[in-house]
């Protein structure tokens, strides 16, 4: 039985988040949570919570054995970019781009 969790508009760069997501794709849930727990990246803690949420969704759906769950698919899509301006010398301004991401996790039983 399939369980999903989505996190949208999270203030992380999709490029940096994909590096974290690639470490856990296809792994068992317990192994993935251990990898994410000890990973120093900012995205790791957010993906850790999202995988935990997907496990809770699986329990709510009545999955027979949570220990048999694995990450069937996990993807990071680009969200809208927040554009800000930073004052610079001589009256100029430069643009600051603050990217956002949409993360989707799908768990399934092996």
Image (tube, helix red, strand yellow):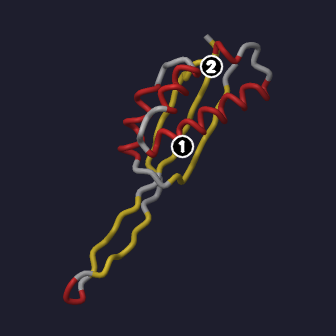
Question: Of all residues shown, which one is farthest toward the top?
Answer: 110
Task: Specify few, some or many for label 1: CA neighbours under 10 Å numbering under 14, 14-19, or 20 or more.
Answer: some
Image location (x, y in percent) of residue 2: 67, 23
| Residue depicted at x 66% and y 15% | 67
Describe the element under mark 1 as helix, strand or loop. Answer: helix
| Residue depicted at x 37% and y 36% | 19
Q: Identify residue for label 2.
A: 108
Q: In screen coordinates, is 94 left or right of 65?
A: left
Q: From the image, state whether disc 2 or disc 1 is nearer to you.
A: 1
Q: Is residue 13 above or below residue 27?
A: below
| Residue depicted at x 64% and y 13% | 68
Task: Name the mark on residue 27.
Answer: none
Q: Quadrant of residue 66?
A: top right
Residues marked 2 and 1 touching at CB (< 8 Å): no
Q: Is residue 88 above or below residue 32?
A: below
Numbered label tally: 2
Q: Quadrant of residue 85?
A: bottom left
Q: Is residue 3 above or below residue 11?
A: above
Question: Of all residues shown, which one is farthest toward the bottom?
Answer: 91
Quadrant location of the N terminus in the rendered image: top right
Image location (x, y in percent) of residue 16: 37, 44
Image location (x, y in percent) of residue 100: 46, 54
Q: In screen coordinates, is 48 left or right of 68?
A: left
Q: Identify residue for label 1.
A: 46
């Amino acid at each position: 039985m399939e369980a999903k969790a989505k996190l949208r508009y999270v203030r992380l760069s999709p490029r940096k988040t994909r590096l974290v997501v690639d470490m856990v794709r296809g792994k068992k849930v317990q192994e993935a949570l251990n990898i994410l727990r000890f990973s120093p990246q900012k995205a790791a803690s957010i993906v850790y919570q999202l995988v935990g949420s997907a496990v809770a969704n699986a329990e709510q759906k009545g999955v027979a054995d949570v220990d048999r769950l694995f990450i069937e698919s996990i993807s990071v899509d680009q969200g809208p970019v927040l554009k800000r301006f930073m004052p610079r010398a001589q009256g100029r301004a430069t643009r600051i781009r603050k990217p956002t991401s949409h993360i989707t996790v799908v768990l399934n039983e092996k």
